[in-house]
Amino acid sequence: MEEMSDPRLGTVRLFLKHDDNKARKLKYNLGPARVLSFGGAYSGHLRALARAGMERGFETIGVVRGEEHLPLNPSLAYARACGMRLVYLDRAAYRLKHTPEVLERLRARFGDVTILPEGGSNAAAVRGCAELPGEIGLDYDVICCPVGTGGTLAGISAGLAPGRRALGFAVLKGAGFLREEVARLQREAYGRVMTNWELNLDYHFGGYAKPSPALDQAYEQVYVAKMIYGILDLAGRGAFAPNSRVVAVVTGQPSTPVASWGEPTGFDSAEPR
Ligand SMILES: *Cc1c(COP(=O)(O)O)cnc(C)c1O
């Protein structure tokens, strides 16, 4: 794990833990022969699902928000190359994607299929992410992660040793509803809500995938750079106790997204995404 230095940290020490949270969220969701899920045209969740389907030999169906645009963008082209079947829902229908009506229609069309929610966040995903804290081989007080749908934060919090805290940074604007969502996911996975986590709403920079010149270009911009900015800013304001040790979970792939997707390597690959 690398340690980051920055004048705003003062006596706080910040360590970066790289982690592919999308693969973790799928770990306990795999097994069925045909899995369908939802995402935008750049969905990392759909890429991770397509990749898992290719590697383990199950069918995947990606329901994409909006119209089909050809040629496919690199994200969808990657999913397609992994064998994912892509279908499209216009924005109005997509908003209703988790309603019984739309789910029924998808089941009628695709038969015996397991449906995962957008972003892959469900109880099994939470249990997958709960394994993350135990893999960190150093002593720390606070663990931070970016928050999209809340599954990663719900799991990290659930997997923490006593005395440690989890701090999530929402990348969506107006994401207060995610507090109830994280609680719901923990209730679903464990039957209770943990009290060791918080969700910070102050560093969304205008909302999901909104670019900002304030963000450090060295980090993935949709999620990770916002969290890094938030941690450093909070540290500069004295929000962490002196000498505390903070771990930042650098989610996704270490290099730039497109380059890191790589070429699908076939059904025998054991490499996680
Ligand atoms: C999906 C994603 C997240 C957010 O995870 P949630 O469980 O949806 O909150 C964070 N970082 C990266 C890079 C992601 O792809």
Image: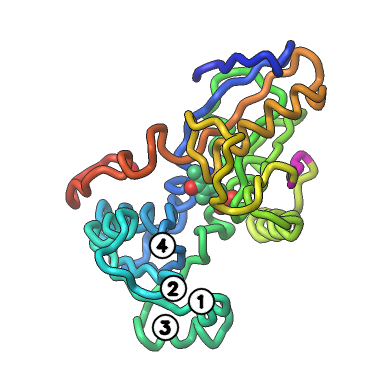
Screen quadrant of the C terminus: top left
Local packing at callout 3 (Cα closer than 10 Å; few below 14, some 14-19, many 20+) is some
Whole-percent x and y of residue 159? 63, 39
How many numbered marks, from 0 up? 4
The residue that mark 3 highlights is: 107
Q: Which amino acid does label 3 sit on?
A: Arg
Q: Nearer the viewer, mark 3 or mark 2?
A: 2
Q: Which of marks 1 and 3 is in front?
A: 1
Q: Residue at x 62, y 26 (%)?
A: 247
Local packing at callout 4 (Cα closer than 10 Å; few below 14, some 14-19, many 20+) is many
Is residue 197 rendered magenta in the image?
Answer: yes
- Would you identify the image quadrant in which residue 235 lies? top right
Q: Residue at x 73, y 12 (%)?
A: 10
Q: In this view, does 16 lie to the left or right of 266?
A: right
**SS for callout 3:** helix
Q: What residue type is labelled 2?
A: Gly
Q: Distance between the residues labelled 3 and 2?
A: 20 Å
The residue that mark 2 highlights is: 66
Whole-percent x and y of residue 6? 63, 16
User: Which mark is first along the chain, 4 or 2?
Assistant: 4
Q: In this view, does 60 lie above or below 140?
A: below
For the record, the magenta segment spans 196-201
Whole-percent x and y of residue 182? 69, 54
Whole-percent x and y of residue 47? 36, 54
The residue that mark 4 highlights is: 41
Which numbered dot is residue 126?
Answer: none
Q: Which amino acid does label 1 sit on?
A: Arg
The residue that mark 1 highlights is: 91
Instruction: Give yes or no for contact between labels 1 and 2 (Cβ–Cβ under 8 Å).
Output: yes
Instruction: Give yes or no for contact between labels 2 and 4 (Cβ–Cβ under 8 Å).
Output: yes
- Would you identify the image quadrant in which residue 68 lies? bottom left
